Image: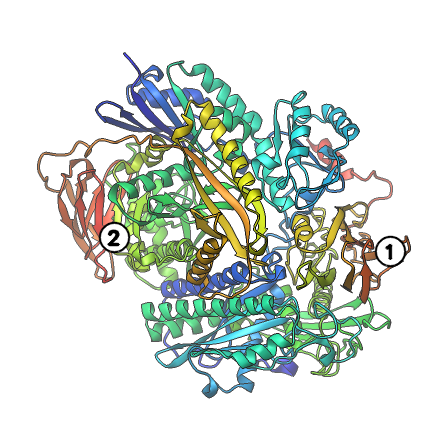
Amino acid sequence: MPARWTVGIDIGGTFTDVVAVRSDDRCVRAAKVPTRTDDRVAGLLAALAAIDLAWTDVSDLVHGTTMVTNAIVEGDLARVALVTTQGFADTLAIGRQNRRHLYRLDLPPKIEPLVPAARRYEVRERLDHEGRVLRPLDPDSVEEVVAALSGSGASAVAVSLLHAYADPSHEESLGTRLRQHFPFVALSNRINPEAREYERTATTVLSAAVMPLAAGYLDRLEQARPDSSRLHLFHSAGGMASPDAIRETPLALALSGPAAGVAAASRTARELGLDSVISFDMGGTTTDVCLILDGEAQISGHRTLADRPLRQPMVAVESIGAGGGSIARVDHGALVVGPDSAGATPGPACYGRGGALPTVTDASLLLGHLDAQRTIGGRLRLDPAAARTAIDSLARAMAMDVEAAALGVLTVVNAAMVQALRRVTVERGIDGRRCVLLAFGGAGPMHAVDVARAFGIARVVVPAHSSAFSALGCVSARMSYSQQRTVRMAAGHWDATRIEAARAALRARLSAPLCAAGVDPADIEIEEVAAIRYRGQSYAIEITDPCFADPAALGAAFYARHELLYGFVTGEPWELVAIRQRASARDRHVAIGGPPPGAASAQPPASWTSCVFDGAGARPTPRHDRARLVVGQALAGPCIVEDDWSTVIVPPGASLTVDAFGHLHIDTGIER
Amino acid sequence: MKSGDTTKPPGAGLQRPVDPVTLEVIRNALNAAAEEMSLIVMRSARSPLLREAGDLSSALTDADGYLVAQGRDIPMHLGVMSFTVREFLKRVPRERLAPGDVWFLNLPEIGGNHLPDVKAIRPIYVDGSIRAFAVSLAHWADTGGARPGSYVADAVDAWQEGLRIPPLRLFSAAGADREKLEFVLANVRGAPEREGDILAQMAATRAAEERVQQIYATHGSAESTAAIAAIHDRAEAQMRAALEAVPDGVYTGEDWLDDDAAGGPPVAVRVRVTVQGDHATFDFTATDDAARGPVNTTPYIAAASVFYVVKALFGPDIQPSGGCYRPLEIVTRPGSLLDPGPERPVVGGNHETSQRIADALFLAFEAIGPQRLSAGGPTTSGLMLFGGRRSDGAWTTLYETHGGGEGARHDRDGAPVIRVHMSNVMNTPVEVIEAEYPIRIECQKLRHGSGGAGRHRGGEGLHREYRILGEEMSVTSMFERRVVPPYGLQGGLPGAPFQVTVVTHDGRAYALPGKANIRLGAGDLVIVESCGGGGYGARQADSPPDADIQSKELKA
């Protein structure tokens, strides 16, 4: 029997999500199993087994993983040697000279460079900013470095030459020579062809540092993979990549986890025809927020991970360090929530694992939002008495009753979420109140309506399969590769030939892995973004589908966007600074079947409990089992809809309906 | 402020108390608004100084000009902005303000520091009354005067330093006042770039206005105003708790500037701190007289340094706000380095003398526990300005600060190449410098051996070489720690002093003074070697340098 399942598997730090879709009848299977960090390949097979599949049943397996992210966060990295232009070996140690903490003298002001001085080497060569050769690459110095590297004990080599973004030839010839001796070589012009030597070097070194880990894992996966099945990895920019492409740029997995959730949200936005969506993924320790316009997640080119700069095209996720485990305290008359988190261990007080400090989850349990009668994931039973004791300490410190204190905790943490929503929308010139909030993750659907109301959003969607949402994102991904390249050009000195050459080179580089994976060149779609600024500005504005042939039109688009974002335009000259492309294999849309199995007719609530939503005190509230809702069913708040993994809160004044896909639509009830 | 003027925000205690939840929500919203202002300026401003180096800050004040929220910016600016609006209101009565106004000013004597740091102030109205002010401070790359970049090393009076802007309404509800704007732009180099910076500052204050109005719409007038008052009270309580933990007593400290910026001997900053219960007085009366050259500074900078040191040593979580200053009394002597009057030049005092004040304060508190302190660090901006014309004829100035080695601490070595204390401005990447200025960087590396020896070593400084490619460039230095090196603590040795060397195209080499304006041409080389950090603790003469490592191995 031919393999006919497309499977998405997202291996997170704690749980592995799996979603499978059968190609002929769109049948869907989904599961959530504990992650096995000791043997990830075995864990992946166990996830398949949990939905009664063997790998031979699978035609395409798309795999998201936090492996690279965790390695970076935990510092579990390979020994890297660095080769730079003569005179610039210390760039990594110098950094941008600013300190991390303004007022903390005790903490180290900057992070240790990943490559110590003893493993930093220099070659004699020099380019200028337009790629002109000021000094040719000296072959003798290359040989000296190759000889020295052999005794360095490094297992990967990063190469970052000055201005390599403007002309890669020195790096490429060095790379060719180095690969004869070292299996893992990362070149800065391939990892991040953009100006600013510290950030490019740090990114290249980080990518080199995860090459052996990624290669080892991919080797084991490829051994386990049957020939009939194709393997893809889910990358940070929200698409999938071939194992070979990931071997060269494993750093592309750095945001794999959050990107998969955002990809599923984008898919849902497209299915529902929503033009402006904010994804809201609230977990135990962090909350990720991302703006999705016309079904496409916004992309950003830089962020930090574990205090190290990371410049890659990535979904523009705003992460804030607040979630269900965030600890509340009263500090000089203000109720402060976070940044400290109880995490998974000891966890909130109500987990009964030794935590005693009041957390957001404890407040939710005390107010009846979480059901004390249910277990989380069929395993963890919550302890309401412990939650009450913890919140009571807050209440006494504020001279409030315990319910008011718990409501206060939710108000404060939700206000922090609102600031994150504001940041992702203001940054793109969008009126966030027009957006739909798409909530998932363990705590997202519990807080979504209150967050939406506080921000002025009228509509919330809790999507189907929300508990295995990241795996759903993997299954729906297209194969795509993205890169941004510095191309500086003043409007007054437009050189169409140079632009065309840069675009063609980028297109060729990004298309190559698609062709290698068997995609017909005619099916490759190229999307482009131009980064433009006033001459002298730092941050460029992104113009999608730029018309490079007509600089006047491009300029007009820039002025219009600048006016929208900043409210003013001047007549100063503008300049192009970078081009970003995404090459993707045209539509491989995996349709997903209709509503999940539901009841034939509307069922009465599974139970009634007493819940507090506001200052009006406790009220009897129906609790519905999500699996037993029917298409078209409408519920008025207050009510609660829950499954093994998440709880959807519909407070008084809001109302919920179930659509044909199994998505829950909530009208927050605010005036727009 | 001056001589015991510890005026309190009025109205505190008159409003009804606000609950802890609303207080936190409004406090966070105000801080977020201030941070958004800084992002807007960074993204939309023109000068590399703002966009690459982030030499800017943002704040919100209450209706009386007392600070209530700030972005995470630069301690020096944030301290000063605690006073800007209050001093502004003394000159411009609120009856003259109207919705839509944005006033610009840079006079050091109006809650300021030096001419390049230009403040944009917008009164924020809700229902017809002023409820807050938004302040956007940005370092303009040029404010006119004798030299590109407006650092006149040999200035002996305030008027040589550039365009002096008293409170000037550049925008009103009707839009930009073109005549005033043109007047300002006519007096600075790089007018198009400056206009972009001005518009960026204006846009930032407009965003803040929207945010504050949203806060008032959401929480109501009474609640919002009460929360703002409570922010002051809370910060005051935090500050008092921090001071309470400091043993009562009198602490004295002093440190020296290299010179008076006019060829004279080192100049002393002296402080006498009296801590009594939850209150402290910082008396700078014994500080030397005003300098002839531009290292003077203002009492507002003295206050900013005091606040920084108290927060860093005793209460990193204290919310900066008008209320923090209530338990602090800061005394400066008119005619002194820190209170020189409006006629003296001040441009370098902003970042050099402010750091020396911080050093004097830290050394005063060595008595209560040196393990709280770091040894002497790069308490200088290490500033070099390279001014000239681009290939397209436009004026351009590279304003580059140079971090040095951090001072060591009782439990660790100092970090290499970092900014400490009152500033946190970033460097400009080599690849940006070479693309935008007629300069080539020949190398940038750690200055090996510059960190002071000790049980823990001071951090290494920086070595960076600038090759001039343009026909003519004006080069200005404004740095300290060239003569008086970063100090060691508890027997640790001082770091290597700062030095800048010029090697002309024909091979002559000379040391550049700490405050100088020179002209260089194509082929000339400027070598910057920033100071190393001081060491901490005496190194035992009879034990090898890595005694710590060995003893760890023995334990293991």
Classify residue A553 by image quadrant.
bottom left
**Where is residue A30 shown, x and y percent of the image?**
28, 28
**Where is residue B28 shown, x and y percent of the image?**
43, 62
Relative to the observer, which residue lies in front, A40 or A425? Answer: A425
Q: Work out whether residue A308 can be spotted.
A: no
What amino acid does circle 1 point to? Answer: Thr
Quadrant (top left, top right, bottom left, bottom right) of the N terminus of chain B: bottom right
- Read off the chain for label 1: B
Display colour scheme: rainbow
Q: Which residue is mark 1?
A: B504
Q: Secondary structure at mark 2?
A: strand
As drawn, B486 above or below B218: above
Residue at (36, 60) in percent of width and height: A396
Relative to the observer, which residue lies in front, A87 or A520? Answer: A520
Classify residue B427 by image quadrant.
bottom right
In the rendered structure, the answer to whether residue A597 lies left or right of residue B541 reads left
Relative to the observer, which residue lies in front, B412 or A254? Answer: A254
Mark 1 vs mark 2, CA separation in Å: 68 Å
What amino acid does circle 2 point to? Answer: Arg
What crowding class fits label 2: few (fewer than 14 Cα within 10 Å), some (14-19), or many (20 or more)? many
**Where is residue B169 shown, x and y percent of the image?**
52, 80
As drawn, A447 above or below A659: below
- Read off the chain for label 2: A
As drawn, A236 above or below A288: above
In the rendered structure, the answer to whether residue B18 lies left or right of residue B318 reads left
Q: Which residue is mark 2?
A: A459
Quadrant (top left, top right, bottom left, bottom right) of the C terminus of chain B: top right
> CB under 8 Å between callouts 1 and 2?
no
